[in-house]
Image (tube, rainbow, N blue to C red):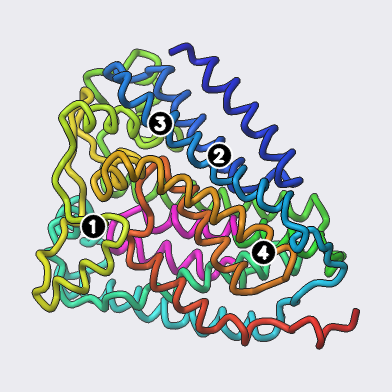
Amino acid sequence: MSVLLPVIFGAFSCWLSKRLFAKWFNPLFIYSVSWTIFIFLYEVRLIRYIQIQNEAWVVIIFSFLSFLLGIITFFSFKYFSTSSQTNRTKPGFSFNERKIIIALYIFSFIGLIVALQHWMVLINKFGSIATVFLRANLIYKMRVEGDIQGTIPYLNSFSYAAVFLGGIYTAIKGKITLTAILPLLIVIVQDMASVGRAGIFMAFILFTLSFFFTRHYYSEYNLSKKLNKINISIALFIIIAIFLVSTTVIKNVRGSIEKFKASTSELNELERSYFISPSLYLYFSSNIGVLSKYLEKGGEDKMIGENTFQPLYNLLSKINIVDHPGFYPKGYFIPMWTNSATYLRDIHEDFGYMGIFLVPFILGLLNTYLWFKFFSTGSIISFIFLVYSTMIVAFSTFYMVTRAAVFILSLIILLISANSLVVKNKELNI
């Protein structure tokens, strides 16, 4: 495939998303940009990847069209439904800044306690902080194999709920503050203990989505005058810088492999680069190759919904109703071993080829419904579900993010506390 085709198709999809949603930052835009980047980077072939099989291209294109069909289905319903054509002139709610700050600090404090306890377990095992960093590669292997015992499970989900609130608070203030980025820093401390980067990436996406959707909402109803574009740009620059520095530090401490036999000379020149490295290129390009190899090998046998509803299966396995599902998917050689294969492998394993159509269709329909539900009724519950359903879209090039316990648990935490964080329409001075 020519490298220009995904760029042209992606650009058209982004233009279409703006026409449909009236704002650039929307679920279709996020889906289009993320998949365009992955396909483009794969086809550039700075690593001599395998050729993508026709079956994989059909699955990728068909799933995108299904996602788009879900969006268009809602727009068609909205067009023909007279009840949905009522325009709102007043917001449904405004965030209570004081309560946002209180919840943010409480959630952050719980997350910090969990992070520090994790570090104490490692220090007790290895003797010192310096030794923990020196043995980072071993700790990473132990974490993958489930050999690190004694850490507090699940409560780190409070950190992600706090990150969500940090994005809201940044949009309200119109600038970056230490209060807003505190949860992100705590997630970084947590992931440094486990020598992982996935949690930081999830926190970065969650912060970005809650920030932009809050900003859309406040600008829609003129609830804030603090939307200075320069301050917003500075805030985003700082957040991106924090993300890049933290993930790069973890990568260097862990000792990622930066030289691949199948690398081109152009990619090998980046071997000593601090930020842009061969392993980063592999991380943001290889997944569709793994998907192709997975489909070529005929797939794998899984329980129905095992990936999509993995937290539920994990719970059921604790009471011996089902076998415990594997934490990490099988790897494939493309021509190096890697295992991430986009959310399409997860839903194919869970539901077969019917899932390749139904899940993206439902996801497109649901995201569009929540988008208009949020902006037309001002529902805080719709806002939370919109952010989290869009996270599934943002992670679609990696895996089905619902398999992460922190995704589900942080969502539950926010839903429970939702109504205490806002001022309702009748209480607003408008």
Kind of residue sitting beneath label 1: Glu
The image quarter in which residue 86 lies: bottom right
Residue 254 is situated, as x and y percent measured from the top left of the image, at 27, 48
The majority secondary structure of the magenta stretch comes to: helix
**Which residues make up the magenta segment?**
181-209
- Mark in front: 1 vs 2: 2
Residue type, mark 2 in image = Leu
Question: Would you identify the image quadrant in which residue 421 lies?
Answer: bottom right
Along the polypeptide, which appears first: circle 1 or circle 3? 3
Query: Looking at the picture, how far across and down is residue 397, in whole percent?
Result: 41, 40
Upstream in sequence: badge 4 or badge 1: 1
Name the secondary structure under disc 1.
Answer: loop
Callout 3 amino acid? Ile
Which quadrant: the C terminus?
bottom right
Q: CA distance from mark 3 to mark 4?
A: 29 Å
Q: Is residue 228 above or below residue 343?
A: below
Q: Residue 53's x, y, as percent?
A: 29, 19
For the residue labelled by badge 4, is the local secondary structure a helix, a strand or a loop?
Answer: helix
Q: Are marks 1 and 3 in contact (CB under 8 Å)?
A: no
**Quick check: 386 left or right of 232?**
left
- Which of the two discs, 3 and 2, labels the residue nearer the N terminus? 3
Residue tagged 2: 68
CA gap, disc 1 and disc 3: 21 Å
Question: Which numbered disc, 3 or 4, marks the residue that appears first in the sequence?
Answer: 3
Give the tally of numbered discs: 4
Q: Is residue 175 left or right of residue 366?
A: right
* Residue holding disc 4: 373
Image height of 42 relative to 212, above or below? above
Residue 222 lies in the magenta-colored region: no
Mark 3 residue element = helix
Assign a secondary structure to mark 2: helix
Image-based side of 10 in relation to 287, left or right: right
